[in-house]
Amino acid sequence: MRFFAVIFLIPSLIMAEDTFTNTNQDTSIERSFGEFLKWRFTRKQPDRIQIETTDEWKKLEQETKYYAVWIGHSTYLLNNGGLTILTDPVFSKRASPFSIVGPRRLISPSISLQELPSIDIITVSHNHYDHLDIKSLKSLHKLNPNALFLVPKGDKKHLIKSGIENVEEFLWWEEIEIKNTKFTFTPVQHWSARGLRDRNKSLWGGWFMKSTDISIYHAGDTGYSADFKETRSRLGSPDFAMIPIGGYDPRWFMSYHHVKPSESVQISQDLGASKSVGMHWGTFILTDEDILEPEKLIEQELKRLDLSKDYFRTPKPGELLRLPVN
């Protein structure tokens, strides 16, 4: 059963027509089924340990603005002064299409669905189950009936089918302005699938959110590419960036679509970000690295590059982060 649950998280080895591709088409995403079996039957399973969490977020008040809270995995609660935003909301116990099999949470969400403030915008980076969780989206819609859902091209149908109608979908570089905040969907290097017959039939990407006061960037899930330099060239440098740091081992199998921590720091530099924080670690066991390794490697890379510890932080889930406002 575990084999079946994890197969949804590996790249397709067959590319069909009418599918999306990455900007870097010279690098192959293809992995053979034999390589997949080699990884599955030779992998080491990291110890199930929990990272430290905090309830500092409870200091939030109704009028609090310009903050970020890591809820877990790629889910961040944000306020940019004018809007309250939730990224890649996953509150379910498993990152899976099934309730009894698939990667199970190591930590509970630092803020429960019921404890969240009123949400204006929900962004989704791509349709993998650890990023697009229909159960969570349905709950959010029920709690926030006026919230707008922003999703990649090809994924709107999943939400409509679930009774969520206030949805807009996007190709790369398409944008929408909401209450003086411009949301732009940007390219990253990844792939998509929710089943065995929809490989890359929906898009994947990051979200650049720019207002007068602050620019915020959520990188979704990605391998390293020139996309981040292009994003900076087109949209400018973010004041605050959320970048994945986990899901990278073994490199021979994961390197194309998941960055390692040193590449995460490089992405921050490519973007010209003022401050960056980590995500996509410490919540589910998806790959082979030890649970605490991403944080340690980020610290080592900052030291190697003589960068401040505040330049790229790995906050605790539930920690209240104040956003740098212009």
Image: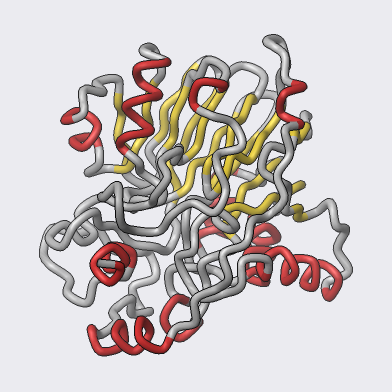
The residue sitting at 45% across, 38% down in the picture is: 91
Q: Is residue 161 visible?
A: yes
Q: Quadrant of residue 24?
A: bottom left
The residue sitting at 66% across, 35% down in the picture is: 69
Q: Is residue 207 above or below residue 141?
A: below
Q: Nearer the viewer, residue 150 or 145?
A: 145
Q: Is residue 23 above or below residue 162?
A: below
- Image side of residue 178 versus residue 292, left or right: left
Q: Is residue 309 above or below residue 297?
A: above
Q: Quadrant of residue 25?
A: bottom left
Q: Percent position (x, y) of residue 147?
A: 41, 18
Q: Quadrant of the N terminus?
A: bottom left
Q: Percent position (x, y) of residue 92?
A: 41, 41
Q: Percent position (x, y) of residue 134?
A: 30, 37
Q: Is residue 277 above or below residue 9?
A: above
Q: Quadrant of the C terminus?
A: top right
Q: Is residue 266 visible?
A: no
Q: Percent position (x, y) of residue 251?
A: 50, 82
Q: Nearer the viewer, residue 295 or 182?
A: 295
- Image side of residue 94 versus residue 206, left or right: left
The residue sitting at 26% across, 50% down in the picture is: 98
Q: Nearer the viewer, residue 180 or 137?
A: 137
The residue sitting at 70% across, 44% down in the picture is: 53
- Image side of residue 211 versus residue 200, left or right: right
Total marks shown come to: 0
